[in-house]
Every structure is written in C-alpha cells, then in structure tokens.
Amino acid sequence: MLKNHKRTPRCRCGMIFTTIGLVAMPVGAARAQSGALNETDLLGEIPLQTVVSRFPQTAAHAPASVTVITADMLRAAGAMNWVDVFRLVPGFQAYAPNANRFGIDYHGQGRELPNHLEVMVDGRSVYDPIQSTVVWGALGVDLDDIDRIEIVRGPSAAAHGSNAFTGAVNIITRSAVQDRGTRVRATAGDRGTQQAGVRHSDQIEDFNYRVSLGFDHNNGFPGFDAADPDDGAETWNLGLRSTYTPNLADTLSFDGGFSRQDTVFGDADRLDEYLPVRYYSQHQRVAWEHQLSDTSDFELTFYHNYLRTYGVRDLGPISASLGVSPVVVPLLLGIPDQHSVQGFHTIVSERYDLEAVQRIRLSDALTGVWGVGTRWDGVDSRFFFDDGATHDEQRPRLFAQSEWLPTTDLAISTGVMLEKTPIGTLVSPRVSFNYLIHPNHTLRLSNARGQRAPSITEADERQVFRLGDVITDDQRRVEANLGAERINNLELAYLARFPEQEIDFDIKLFREEVRDGLDDYRESIAALPPFFDSERLVRDNVARWNAAGAEAQAVYHLSPRTWFRLHYANQDLNSRRVARFDPILQIRNFDGGTPRHSGGLLVNHRWSDALDFGIFVYSQSAVDWRNGNPISGFTRVDAQATWHFKAGSSKGDLQLVAQNLGPDYSEFNRANVFETAVYLRARLDFPD
C-alpha cells in the first residue's frame, strides 16, 4: 500500500552543526555584486551567481545546476510572456492552461497549478499560499524591467526553504543605479495585443530610484474571441525600486508596487464554466545592508505581500438550472427559488517575512552564509475553508551554507535549512563535491534532500457549495495529519569552458525519488439530492514517483557578432498514486505528465551596429497534461529582427517579432490553439 505512516522529521545534527560552524565565525565574505549581466559576460569573465548558496559562486563551484537568463537573451528570443521565458531553460515545463494563466514547473507532473517551485522577485518570495503556486499575472513585473533570471535546476530547500522542493528561481530586476533617464515602450500585434510602459530612473545625491508603469492587454487565444467570457486579460503594473547610500558601509533599499489583472479562470474545454477573475496584488520590501569589515557583511530584510482575488458568475435561478418550476425548488431543496452563483468570491492572502543574514569568509579557502528568519502567512476564504475564519501559520527558519576549498582542485559545499512548521520541524540538507579534473573542466557529484510542508490551503481545505444552509456539492476535504513530501536527488554533472573557442557547456545526469507526495483520491459520500455528485476528492500523502534523465546546455560565441545557445532535457517519469481506497484499491500513474524530450536552439546575429536578427526553435515531445488534455509533440519557430537607432541624444530600437512560423499547435488543452502571431515593439530612451 502506497500510503506511508507519517514520520516525525529527525534532526541531522552532524551536518547542521558542521555547516553552521564553518560559516558562523566573525569574519566575512565579499558582497554579491548586482551589476548587469549580459551575453558577453557569460562568454568572457567567469560570471558569479548567488541563487544557489546565497553568496557569490561560479557555476564550477556551485552545488547544483544553474541557468542564467539575461535581458539580451529575452530580446534575442522575442519573449512575450513567462512561458516564452522558461522555455529557454532545460528541464522546465512551461505551458498555458489559459492564454493568460501560466504553469511553470521543473521536473513537474503536468499539474494545472504546479506547487514545487520557489519563485522570487529580487529575493522576495512570490509563491502564494492560496493555490500553492505562483500567480504569474499578479507579479507586477514587466519583462522589459528584468536584468537577469537566476535558476537553480534541482532541490533547493537547503537554501530557500520548503517551497523550493524541486528548484528555485530569482527574477532580478534592473537596480535603481543601472539606468539614468526615461524609457518609453509600446507593443502592438496579433491577439489584440496592446502594451505600453514608461520607466524613469534618477539620482538625488545619495538616493537612487526607478519608477515604472506598465499596461498590457490581449484577447487571448483566437478561437475564444466569440466566447463569453473570452480568455483575454488586461493588466496594470506600478513599481518603485530605490536605494539610499549614506556612507560606504551602509545601503538602505526600498521596493514597492501593485498590480491589477482582469482575466478568466477555467478549463478551455468547458467554456460554460469560465469564471471572470480580478487579481489585485501589492508588495513592500525594505532592506539594510551593512559592511562589517572588508570580509564580512550583514543584511536585514523585511517584506510584505498582499493578494486579493475575486471571481463570481451568476448562473441564474435554481429552477432554470434544474429545469423545473420555481414552486418545485422548495419541495426539492427546502429553500425558495433564488439565483445561484459560481466562483470563489473574495480570497485574500497576506505574508510578512523578516530575515537576517551574515555572509562571511574565514579564509581564501572557506566562504559561507548563515541566517535566521520567520514568515507569517494568512488566508481568508470561505470558498476554500467553509468557515469564514482566517487560516494562518508561522514558520521560523535557520539556515547555513558553506564552500570549502581543501585543495586547488576540490570544492566541497554543504548546506542545511531547518524550518519549524505546523507538521513539525523539517530538515533539508545538501552536499556537493566539485572536482577540477583539468583547468576549466569540472566534475560535480551532489546529493540534495528536501521536505515540503503542505501550504495553508493544502492542509486546511474544506470545499463545499451551499444554497442557504443546504450543501449542494461536497467537493473536497483533507485527510487529518498530512505529512511532509520528501525528495532525494542525486546528480553527476560535467562543466566545461573553452575560453579560446568561447564555449560554455554543462551536462548532468540525475535521479530523483519523491515519497509521500500530496495528491487526491476519490471517495463516495452520503447521498446529496440525486442530481448532485456523490463523490468528493480527498487530499493525502498518496503519491510517489521516480524521475531520471539528463539535461545539457551550451553557449557558443561563433564570432563577435554571432552566438548560439542550445539546451536539451530528457526525463523518464515512473509514478504511482492511489486513486481510490473503497470499495477496491485503485492505483493510477501520471507517467505521461511531462514531456520525455524537450529542447531549444537560440541564435542571434548582429548584421551591423544598427541591425540584429534572432531565431528560437523549441521542440517538445507528446505529453498528457494531468489537468489538461493529451497534446501531440510540436516544434515551434520564433524569429525577431531589431533595428537600433539614435535620434539626437536619445536612442531606441524597433523590434519585429514573429511567433510560431509553422503549423498551429495546442497549449495544455486542445482548444488552446496557438497560431502564427506577429508583434511590433518599440523602445525609446531619453537621457537626463
């Protein structure tokens, strides 16, 4: 039987105290630099990233596989939305359940709402406890404001906590000190696309700031233009990022913003159930960085997230839905005839997070970071909880990471995270051995283990529909005493740099084992009125799966004007879950829930100082999305041409983007047909 007994997490004290002991001494580490990173940087000096261990590391020393997506790469690929962005990353699944609602996952199982990937914006977690996923339409981030995206392809709970079960993403926007002046931009094209934005950056003595305003409208997939409601969206974003540096040792920063999106929620093959939805989000983040010495620094960060979701649809009188006379309704249900509404009404989630971090360096051979933090999450939703109460939780945490170079050829990285959660204290360790087999050639053997506690909604959900005091539909409950999901990941990787040929290459073999996975099984329930469902879903630790495969990525700078980027992923998924316990045990699998093969080739060529051209070819094998439809494999070709110009003291560019220069294909659901689409984008920069 698949369902395991719940386990009380045991403290791996040896690793915890070893790691903290290595990094918690009063000497320090160099601070992470936040300057712009472009494609030339990736092929020139060895770049540093901070997302894996939370201090600067090269890819050759990092304890996990890393992908960095730069602003130049996004422009070269002609990326229009988040699905386009993450199709540049090996091993990621990026798909669109609706035209403006995205699923982004790493080593996922084809869920409509993937829940195992931690996503951050400038270090602030945007993983939301309402649906245990990321609401991409409410991030408040325009692609044009992105400096780079650092991505950990592997379990990262040791550095980023329970939500980073299979990986972590940090979307880094342009800092307040990177630009001066004003940028205006506009986009128009197919699907009724209209985008506009303005960004202004300036400095007032020791204070630097950047403020941005963005608007985005589209009509969604073409096949839904006549539907009511369609799957289009309209989004407004307003953001502020600022820094104040009173002296050489201190930096204060403040970020804030809000976003509003009007769109729909629903299945593309059930248009009659499409629900109009409005998302309203806001956030504030304040941080203080203090240079303790030449080799040590300290950072204190506090942030607040707020998300309000509203969605209701009037279904008309109950009598009309049942096809009976209004006088019959009281006889059937014991209530007078009235209007029935569909939807989740108002849902509110809120988060407060406080964290203190010290980055330290003991010697040229030993570097690390340690920190403490606490997070409070709260959710208000009668739809999810059926009680009108606020459901909340607090999770204190303690973490440490270290990098030790015992010889010039070997780097040993260790890390651990302790989280106190409502189901107990979770311990997530990681260890890596990176061996320099030849200058610029590295072998890495790493093992990461993680535990993921259920989110508030996953742990407390009780979903029923009522008309007055009458339960008309009992949809979902949660088994008592849910346990943590557990992952064990083993990787063997080879990384190579060929400076003279200007080639970067890495490949990894991996095996992941997940046990006690959260999933749903069906159970029969006491009879409701005969025209309602007699089954409901129950969430419990009833799933397990093994994943094995290979991933590779390479960047080749053919000439000063031409570069190539290639990536590929192969994943074999072997899964089992309990679909029903009674009257007989039923076992199902979701082996087809992720593409067996996926990959892409991005090419960019600068014909002259004024003109460049890019092409991105993405291919994916067939997949049977768990909450969607079986979709055939497809190959998609996108192209862009950009003209760079100057107008007096200003400069700008015009970009023509053509997506899917080939046959139509379907996204997640057969009704979501992606046709060829063409867009024209313009940007103009005005100096101070």
Image: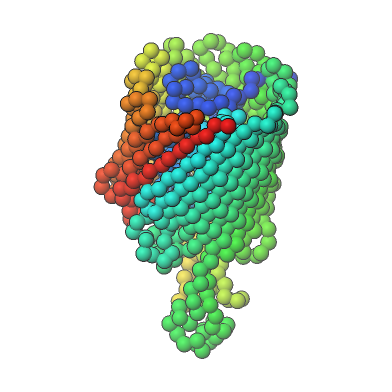
Residue that extends furthest to the front in the rendered view of this protein: 648
Measuring from the top left, give residue 436's x and y in whole percent: 47, 14
Q: Residue most toward the bottom? A: 327
Residue visible at 52% across and 60% down in the picture = 277
Q: How many marks?
A: 0
Place of residue 507 in the rendered image (x, y in percent of width and height, measured from the top left): 40, 26
Position of 77 compared to 431: left or right?
left
From the top left corner, tell me how far across and down residue 363 is, in percent. 65, 13
Specify the quadrant of the image occupied by residue 320. bottom left
Residue 199 x, y percent position in the rendering: 55, 40
Q: Nearer the viewer, residue 173 or 594?
A: 173
Q: From this viewpoint, which residue is outermost toward the left? A: 663
Q: Nearer the viewer, residue 24 or 19?
A: 24
| Quadrant position of residue 323 | bottom left
Reply above or below: 171 against 463. Answer: above
* Residue shown at the point (34%, 46%) measured from the top left: 678
**As rendered, which of 204 and 581 lies closer to the eye?**
204
**Picture quarter with the C terminus:** top right
Residue lying at 44% horizontally and 22% vertically, measured from the top left: 40
Q: How is the image coloured?
A: rainbow
Name above or below for residue 622 compared with residue 568. below
The quadrant where residue 568 appears: top left
Q: Is residue 666 visible?
A: no
- Please tell me which residue lies in front, 66 or 35: 35
- Relative placement, left or right, of 363 versus 571 is right
Residue at left offset 31%, top offset 50%? 675
Residue 224 visible at all: yes
